[in-house]
Amino acid sequence: MRSDDTGAATVWAAVAVATLLAVASVVFSLGSVMVTRHRAADAADLAALAAAGQADRGEAVACARARFVAERMSVRLVRCSFHNWDALVEVEAQLKAPLGGSGVATAHARAGPVPTGPTGFSRGCCRFGGAPVTTR
C-alpha cells in the first residue's frame, strides 16, 4: 500500500538544492562586483599617483604614464587632467559576472605633487590639509 506523499522528500530536496544554487550565484555575483569596484579604485589611485609623479614633465607625459599604469591594472583610463599640480584621474573596469552579466565600475582619484629634496619636501611645494608644508 502506497501513501499519497510518496516522493515528497525528493521534491523538497530538489527545491532546496535549487534555492541554494540561486543564493550561491547571487553571492558570487555580488563578490565579483565588489572585487571589480575595488580593482577600479586601486587602479585609479595608482594612476593618479603615477601622473602626479610625472607632473613636472608636462600633462601629456604624466597622462601617458597614468594610461600605462591603468592598462597594466586591466582598466581603461577615461580621463586624465590637472588642476594646478593635482592629477585628476577617472578609470573604468569591466565587470565579468559569473553568470554572463556585465557592467562597468568607475573610480575617480586625485593625487598631488610628489615631494622632492634632501628632506623629502621642497620648501613650499606641497599642501597638507590646506596648509603649506614647510621644512626647517
Image (cartoon, rainbow, N blue to C red):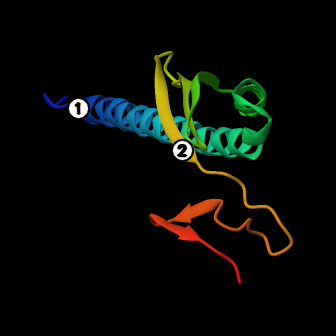
Where does residue 31 sit, x and y in percent of width and height? 48, 41
* Residue located farthest toward the right when viewing the structure as drawn: 118
Instruction: Determine the residue positioned at 19% across, 28% down.
Output: 2
Q: Which mark is residue 37?
A: none
Which of 4/89 is in front? 89
Q: Quadrant of the C terminus?
A: bottom right
Where does residue 26 sit, x and y in percent of width and height? 38, 34
Query: Is 7 above or below relative to 131?
Result: above
* Residue located farthest toward the left when viewing the structure as drawn: 4
Query: Is 70 above or below relative to 101?
Result: below
Which of 106/16 is in front? 106
Q: Mark 1: which amino acid?
A: Ala
| Residue underneath mark 2 | 110
| C-alpha distance separating marks 2 and 1 | 60 Å
The image quadrant of residue 39 is top right
Q: Quadrant of the N terminus?
A: top left
In the picture, measured across the screen, residue 46 lies left or right of residue 106, that is right
In the picture, measured across the screen, residue 72 lies left or right of residue 15, that is right
The image quadrant of residue 67 is top right
Instruction: Determine the residue positioned at 54% across, 25% down.
Output: 92
Which of 103/13 is in front? 103
Numbered marks: total: 2
| Residue underneath mark 1 | 8
Instruction: Determine the residue positioned at 73% across, 23% down.
Output: 60
As helix, strand or loop, the secondary structure at mark 2 comes to strand
Instruction: Determine the residue positioned at 80% across, 35% down.
Output: 57
The image quadrant of residue 91 is top right
Where does residue 89 sit, x and y in percent of width and height? 57, 33
Q: Mark 2: which amino acid?
A: Arg
